[in-house]
Image (spheres, grey):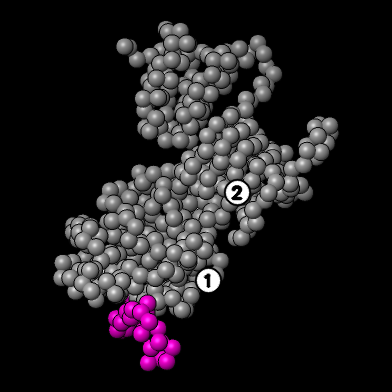
Amino acid sequence: MGEVIVITSGKGGVGKTTTSANLGTGFALQGKKVVLVDADIGLRNLDVVMGLENRIVYDLVDVTDGNCRLKQALIRDKRYESLYLLPAAQTRDKNAVTPEQMKQLCDELKQDFDFVIIDCPAGIEQGFKNAIAGADRAIIVTTPEVSAVRDADRIIGLLESEGKHNPKLIVNRIRPRMVKKGDMMNIDDIIEILAIDLLGIIPEDDYIVVSTNRGEPAVVNPISQASTAYKNIVRRLMGENIPLMVIEDNTSFFNKLKKIFNL
Amino acid sequence: MREYVVFKGSRNGLQLVLDATVDFEILIENLAAKLESAVDFFSRGTTVELPAKVRNLSCQEQEELSKLLASYGLVFREVNEQCTDDIAMPEPKEIETLIVAKTIRSGQEIIHQGTVVIDGDVNPGAEVIAGGDIIVNGTCRGVVHAGAYGDIRATIKAQRLLASQIRIAGLIARAPDHLDQPDQAEVAFIEDGIVIIKTVSIQEDEMRELQA
């Protein structure tokens, strides 16, 4: 029996879809059978980030409406055999499915997969309620900005009222140089406000933009810093004890030199 | 103002209830005003049914109604098997071509029984479903389905054919993951059970017409 994990944030643009794609691919790299579910009906993106848009024939709403069988709507990833995507419908809206239908869908997917990862839409309305309905646990993505942290706090509260306790936190797009100078919220400030367990931190990485445009998740590239961070998170989710990554600021000249001499 | 046109929800979509005592022109006007005032309310692709035997419409009237609904993205389905003058004129009528003079954006859907002409682009995430041919006078990047009711002779033409998926009748062709940009208009059709894409040359078009 697998586990259903919902990736949520409240605020838009903090990296839910990127995180979903990378964690899903990361699990597949570890040999796990994973399905990514895009719950952002009407504003689907996960298919584009995974580079699978041209393979969509049936979607999540077709499954819940009974237009097709669940297996028909699952798209196998082009790189990893054990990775699948259940795309969202684009021509419908969030009201096209109900939380009960989503719960049933998750229960069905859990039978066949080790991990079911749900990419939640931004906001706290119907789409959010659908996305969390079948989740066993939640991962909150935030960025080091007061607005994102406030929305994350609201989401944690809403999850608690739905009986989903102990969500885990990912802080995305950390810029070490700015944190050092005190221009950006640091991790401790965020943890102090949200008071939940930290699952990992992801440094700001230009490669994410490249990978999104290519339709190839960053974890595939071993050189990118974000890739290592995501891989660590995957291993932590699988129960390993991996220390938090020390994010080094490799933009300064001195650090570049250090890297060359492998210091 | 009294309401001559009423929408009712039903299991299969919406039901259109028309007042039998009022002139058809007034009904159409009334309906247009109603649709205009609630553009966002009606989701595209919703089926609108006309319950049988409430009001008998002529074929022309039905067509007008269907066209008006189609321009708001609604699909008209008559529950009456025949329109009133069908009995006198049993020949099947050619379904009209739908011309859409705008870009179809992500999440938008055009569904039409006959041929669809798009004067604009079809963007990624948009869908065009036609019973007949599809002609895009622009760039086609979305999903296009011609001959959606089984017509394997249907074709898809576009100034720049970059569709993520091309469907004709029951066949689906997926774009390769890296697509070269065509610099010429292209046409997709079924030949020997597979979807073929060819550049459109004027001579070829003329040949086809001659053959037909």
Q: Is circle 1 on the same chain as circle 2? A: no
Residue hosting label 1 = A80
Tell me residue A197's x, y (percent): 22, 73
Q: Residue at x 69, y 18 (%)?
A: B91
In magenta, the rendered stretch is A236-263
Magenta stretch prevailing secondary structure? loop
Q: Residue at x 81, y 38 (%)?
A: B203
In the rendered view, does B188 fall on the left or right side of B24?
Answer: right
In the rendered view, does B80 fall on the left or right side of B211?
Answer: left
Q: Is residue A232 visible?
A: no
Residue A164 inside the magenta-drawn segment? no
| Mark 1 crowdedness (10 Å alpha carbons): few <14, some 14-19, many ≥20 | some
Q: Residue at x 44, y 76 (%)?
A: A224
Tell me residue B168's x, y (percent): 65, 44
Q: Chain of mark 2?
A: B
In depth, the one of B60 and B208 nearer the eye is B208
Residue A254 inside the magenta-drawn segment? yes
In depth, the one of A126 and A230 nearer the eye is A230
Q: Chain of mark 1?
A: A
Which amino acid, mark 2? Ala
* Placement of the C terminus of chain A among the 4 image quadrants: bottom left
Q: Residue at x 69, y 38 (%)?
A: B154
Up-down relation of residue A165 to residue B195 (above or below): below
* Placement of the N terminus of chain A among the 4 image quadrants: bottom left
Up-down relation of residue B80 to residue A254 (above or below): above
Q: Secondary structure at mark 2?
A: loop
Tell me residue A30's x, y (percent): 45, 78
Which amino acid, mark 1? Tyr
Residue hosting label 2 = B163
